Structure formats: C-alpha cells, structure tokens
Amino acid sequence: MRTTAVTTDHPKTKLFYGWLVVAAAFVVTFVGFGSAYTFSSFVESLQRDFGASRGSVSLVFSFAGFLYFGLGVISGPFADRWGARNLAALGMGLVGLGLVLASQAQTIVQVYAAYSIGIGAGVGCAYVPTLGAVQRWFVKRRGFASGLAVSGIGVGTLVMPPLATWLIANLGWRDAYLVLGIMAAVIGIGSSLLISDDPRRHGTGPDGDPLDQLSGSPARQGVSIRDAVRTRRFAGLYAACLISAFGVFVPFVHLVPFAVDHQVAPAAAVLLLGMIGVGSTAGRFFLGGIADRIGRDTFLIAMYAGMAVSLAIWAVASGFWSLAIFALLFGVFYGGWVAILPAVVTDHFGGRNVGGIIGILYTSVAIGTLLGPSAAGFAFDVSHSYVIPIAISAAANVVAALIAVATMRTGSPVASTVPS
C-alpha cells in the first residue's frame, strides 16, 4: 500500500516547482539586464547635458558591467551558503535605487556612482545566485532550463531600450530613470521571492524525479571551489570568456551611435538594440535544448565562432538593413553563449558550489566588459571610426573558439550524467 501511495503522490503529477524558479529567473534577468541595456537610449542626453565625450560616457556602462559580472565572485559563494532568494531580492532593490539616484545626478561623476554602482552591484548580487539556483533544479534539461532563464536578458534588451526612449521623449531623461527605477524594484523584488535553491525542500529531486529514486543528491554533489579553479578545464573556460568578452559588449554601447553616424535615424537606430534582443531571445530559448542534444561543450565553441562571424558582418555594414542582419545574428549567438555557460560549468564541476564557481568564472567577463566598450569609445574619439575596435572584437572571438576547442581535450573533474 505504501508503494501505491508514493506512486499516487508522484511529484510529476504536480507543477514542477523548478519551472517557477526558471520563471523567476527570467523576470530577474529581464529587469536587471533590461535596465542596464537601456543605457544607449540615454547616451545622447548625457552627452548633451554634461558635455561628456563618447568615451567617458561609455565608461558608465563599462563600470556597471564590470561590477555586475565581477561581483559574482562574492554573491555566488554567499548564495551557496545563505540562499539565492535573499541575494536576488537585494540586487533588484539596488537596481531600482541606482536608477532613481541616476535621475537626480547633477554631474557625470554622479551618474557613474548611481548607475554604475547601483545597477552594477544590483545585477552582481542577483545574476549569479539566480543562475546557480536554476542549475540545481535540472540535470537532463539543464541547457534548456538555463536558456529559458536567461532569455529574460534577450526580452529585456528587446523591450526596455524602446521603453526608455519613449519615456525620455515624453518625460525627459531624469523622470525616465525614475519610472524605470520604481518598476525595477517592485517587479524585481517580487519575482525574487519565488526563487528556491534546493528541490528537496519541495519534495522532489532534479527534473522532478521522486526522492525515493535518487541515490544521494545530484543537486549538491560536486568539487570544491578551490579544486575547480585549479583545473585546466576551468583555466580554459576562463581564458575563452575573458578574450571573448572584450568584444561581446561593444555593440550594446556603440551600435546605436554607430548607426546614427551612418545616417540611420535615431529612432530606427534604437530598434537595432531591440533586434539584438530578438535574436538573443531566440538563441536562449531555442538553442539551449539543441545544446543538450549535440553536446554543450561543442555548442559553446559554435557560439564563439558565430559571434566572430557576426561581428565581421558589422565591420562591413553601413545601412539599416545590413546592421539589422548583424544585430539579429549577433543576438542569436550571444544569447546561446550566455545560456550555455552556467550549464557547462555545472556539467564539469557539479552543483554543490556552482554559484561560487560561476561567480569566479564571470570575473573574466567583468574584465572584458570593463575594457572593451570603453576602449572602443576612446578609439572612436581618436580616429572617428569604429573599424579597428570591431575588427579586434571579431578576432577576439576567433581566439576564444580556439581556446574552447583545446579545453575540450582536458579532463572533466565531475563526470556528468548527461553527455556534455
């Protein structure tokens, strides 16, 4: 009779709570990164009101990006100990506060402090813990679940910059920041409360498997952070991310001004960021499942190669439609890259310390984000051309793909239950 009772209460007859965690992660990434990627909509207003150069204004985004990827090294381990929900809620509150304070800035330095520290620290607190929580809920469909979770970044890139542009046109840039800040705090904190770290607390195992069929807890198995970072596998992942990130975030700051420089109307130029969002959403939503089937390591290499090819297209594009093709292609490969990285880390190092390991890995992305967009801006100030920064961005992703190929040949510290 006991066996019958367990079968009747099989967790898969109910909604698997892991999908609610994915939905919460979607909203957190939508709010956090969507708020960050509205920055291009504000560049013209900030330049005009503060008399700043394009390079110095680009530093605002670069500092924020450095913080929201770099702080994962702190927030990841904290989340492994204290829970992702608390870190995510704190982060969303900081995002809202940063936007509100940016609306009150009287100098470009105050914009640096409010936007860079507020959004940078906010996303830094929320992003890695949220992704780490999602990984523990899935094994067989880890790539697909990760893709859905981070597709919020793509949808945010699609929705938030046009919304910011509309708000600026109707309210001015200060009130636009104020409205966005209130929205970010309310929606972001509310969704964070749905995040949970361990499926066992909801009476199930990863993928919704019943607890009585589990041997141990796959969600909490894995190597220590110290052992992980000493491996050749981690060193290769880190190097590839570092080099790739130098060019990956250049379009998010400079695509709109590039298009305007090539006689694309400002309203149409902002749509290009939305097209990156469309492509990115497609990449995150659809490609994660493909990665589960063809192998997640192989898929990661393909994403680096795809970003290199798309950036090469940007180098020769000039009109709106050629830039739109670039934006869509780049978005697809960028979205696939972001979606698969957490799953690859969990495949090779396990779920026990996944937040901390992802956090350390993302310091590489933080460095690239700090250097790439700002260097491109200063290069433009000197040469009045984006040709060299775009070419370097494309070449960086070729190198990243080659490093990833070499990394595949090294041993994995944890044998995954799913081919990677």
Image (spheres, rainbow, N blue to C red):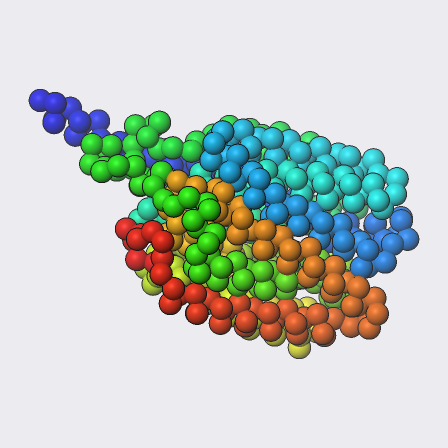
The spot of residue 290 in percent (x, y) is 37, 59
Q: Residue furthest left?
A: 1
The residue sitting at 79% across, 64% down in the picture is 378
- 375 lies above or below 174: below
Quarter of the figure with residue 103: top right
Q: Nearer the viewer, residue 317 or 202?
A: 202
Q: Is residue 8 above or below residue 165?
A: above
Residue 280, given in percent of the width and then of the height, sits at: 54, 56
Q: Please state if 223 lies on the left or on the right of 209 as rendered.
A: right
Give the residue drawn at x 66%, y 45%.
67
- The N terminus - image quarter: top left
Tell me: 395 left or right of 356: right
State which quadrant residue 75 falls in.
Answer: top right
Residue drawn at x 43%, y 49% is: 227
Coordinates of residue 161 in the picture (x, y in percent): 68, 49
Asked if residue 91 lies left or right of residue 212, the reply is right
Instruction: Pick the residue in front: 13 or 100.
Output: 100
